[in-house]
Image: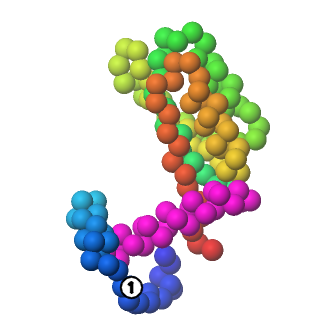
Amino acid sequence: MSSVDETIRFSVSLPRPLLDELDRRVVGKGYASRSELVRDLIRERLVENTWERGDEEVAGVLTIVYDHHQRELTQQIVDIQHQEYVRVVATTHVHIDHHNCLETIILRGLPAQIERLSLEIGGLRGVRFSELTRVARLDH
């Protein structure tokens, strides 16, 4: 939110079990208030909606763990990243141990394109973990 955004207070009625669950999440996730949690839940849903519509550029962070001894895997990962339908903004590569590497790949493009790249890399033999974090602009 920008400094010119006005904060509006409103009431929400919830059944006791739902309010109890909300309060458990406030405490469990370290939120300062119910309002902070509700704002985050709304933002998450707005990002999901943007990705579902699929009509505007979004960003994502693909996190993968892979066996760097797997024959030609590193080259396959790089080749997929060089496909033109998604822009790779940055990558970070960390050696976890003798066999495993952790890589984060920051991407920009249309949701379907980013999803496809994520599935292509995640499905490669030797990729042990793959998770895509979805991001979208929330200022409009």
Label 1 sits on a secondary structure element that is loop
Does any portion of residue 87 appear in the rendered image?
no
Q: Is residue 121 above or below residue 69?
A: below
Graded by Cα atoms within 10 Å as few (under 14), some (14 to 19) or many (20 or more), the crowding at tag 1 reads: few
Magenta-colored span: 32-56
**Quarter containing the C terminus:** bottom right
Point out residue 7 in the picture as x, y percentages from the top left corner: 44, 87
Q: Quadrant of residue 8?
A: bottom left
Q: Is residue 82 left or right of residue 10?
A: right
Query: Between residues 5 and 129, which one lies in front from this camera angle?
Result: 129
Q: Is residue 40 magenta?
A: yes
Question: Image point 64% across, 43% down: which residue?
Answer: 115
- How many labels were placed on the picture? 1
Point out residue 121 in the picture as x, y percentages from the top left corner: 60, 29
Q: Is residue 12 above or below residue 74?
A: below
Question: Image point 69% across, 60% down: which residue?
Answer: 53
Q: Is residue 26 left or right of residue 101?
A: left
Query: Between residues 2 and 66, which one lies in front from this camera angle?
Result: 66
Q: Is residue 99 magenta?
A: no
| Model colouring | rainbow
Question: Image point 41% across, 20% down: which residue?
Answer: 100
Q: Main secondary structure of the magenta part?
A: helix
Outermost residue toward the right? 84
Q: Which amino acid, by three-letter code, is at mark 1?
A: Val
Point out residue 86 in the picture as x, y percentages from the top left corner: 71, 42
Q: Is residue 24 left or right of residue 3?
A: left
The residue to which callout 1 is attached is 12
Does any portion of residue 43 appear in the rendered image?
yes
Q: Is residue 43 above or below residue 92?
A: below
Q: Is residue 79 left or right of residue 3?
A: right
Question: Image point 49% across, 11% down: which residue?
Answer: 69
Query: Between residues 119 and 4, which one lies in front from this camera angle?
Result: 119
